[in-house]
Image (cartoon, coloured by chain):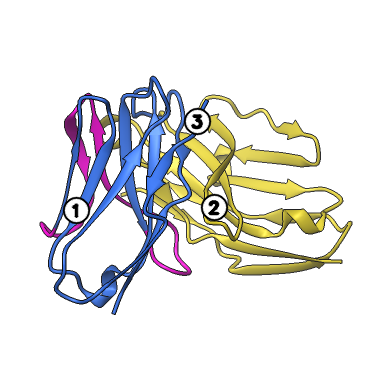
Chain colours: A blue, B yellow
Amino acid sequence: DAGVTQSPTHLIKTRGQQVTLRCSPISGHKSVSWYQQVLGQGPQFIFQYYEKEERGRGNFPDRFSARQFPNYSSELNVNALLLGDSALYLCASSLTGTHNYGYTFGSGTRLTVV
Amino acid sequence: AQKVTQAQTEISVVEKEDVTLDCVYETRDTTYYLFWYKQPPSGELVFLIRRNSFDEQNEISGRYSWNFQKSTSSFNFTITASQVVDSAVYFCALSGSMDSNYQLIWGAGTKLIIKP
């Protein structure tokens, strides 16, 4: 079975631009979570979607948005990019989105804003 | 508020030494889960263990062992006879119940360097 797939793997954008990151969960998993990991720090929770509904949102500005599609894949959008948005963006796939079944992470998308 | 503290920023040992990574957590939830993940240079977070708050038994998996002590709010991770392949950043994480059971709260990570 394929694991969690994220695309693209690397991305360079200019300040003020918009970016879309994509995630395909493990087959059968209905929940996708997004995390931001700044270099040298632990991941920070951004969003979780379960059954195409937003279940939770972390402390991130409205420039960050996401959605989940009927096939359970997900997109994370970031508008008006700032230098501080440079980070590794990780997607986590889960059966139900809670700790009961754990989380499987993708390899991430490394975003550099210049 | 929930919090995870990994006080050791970086640890460097020589291969075959034993090493313990510390994790201290804070939560007011009575039901919660604790996790350890490994992050190699490739960036992917690799799941190592999940432990619920009602199970204080220590666990051993090969060269890895975990010591969960609710009395001190700690969930420490020991690698016995370390190997160069163990070099990575290790994260401890917490998932609570109630409103926050859908997210992981992470420590800052401990970078482990195993020298040959």
Q: Left or right: where does residue A61 sit relative to residue A36?
A: left
Amino acid carrying label 3: it is: Ala
Point out which mark residue B91 bears. Answer: 2
* Residue found farthest to the top: A28
Q: Is residue B31 above or below residue B48?
A: above
Q: Position of residue B2 (x, y in %)?
A: 36, 48
Given contact means CB atoms under 8 Å apart, are the residues at marks 1 and 3 in contact?
Answer: no
Please name the residue shown 39% across and 40% down the image: A92
Q: Which residue is mark 1?
A: A77
Q: Left or right: where does residue B84 sit relative to residue B112?
A: right
Q: Is residue A82 above or below residue B25?
A: below
Label 2 to label 1: alpha-carbon separation: 26 Å
Q: Position of residue A35 (x, y in %)?
A: 34, 51
Of circles 2 and 1, which is in front? 1
Where disc 1 sits, the SS reads strand
Amino acid carrying label 2: it is: Phe
Given contact means CB atoms under 8 Å apart, are the residues at marks 2 and 1 in contact?
Answer: no
The crowd level at tag 2 (other Cα within 10 Å; few <14, some 14-19, many 20+) is many
Q: Is residue A90 above or below residue A10?
A: above
Where disc 2 sits, the SS reads strand
Q: Quadrant of residue B97?
A: top left
What chain does badge 3 belong to?
A: A
Label 1 to label 3: alpha-carbon separation: 24 Å
What chain does badge 2 belong to?
A: B
Point out which mark residue B11 bears. Answer: none
Label 2 to label 3: alpha-carbon separation: 24 Å
Amino acid carrying label 1: it is: Asn
Range drawn in magenta: A37-63
Observer-nearest of A66 and A71: A71
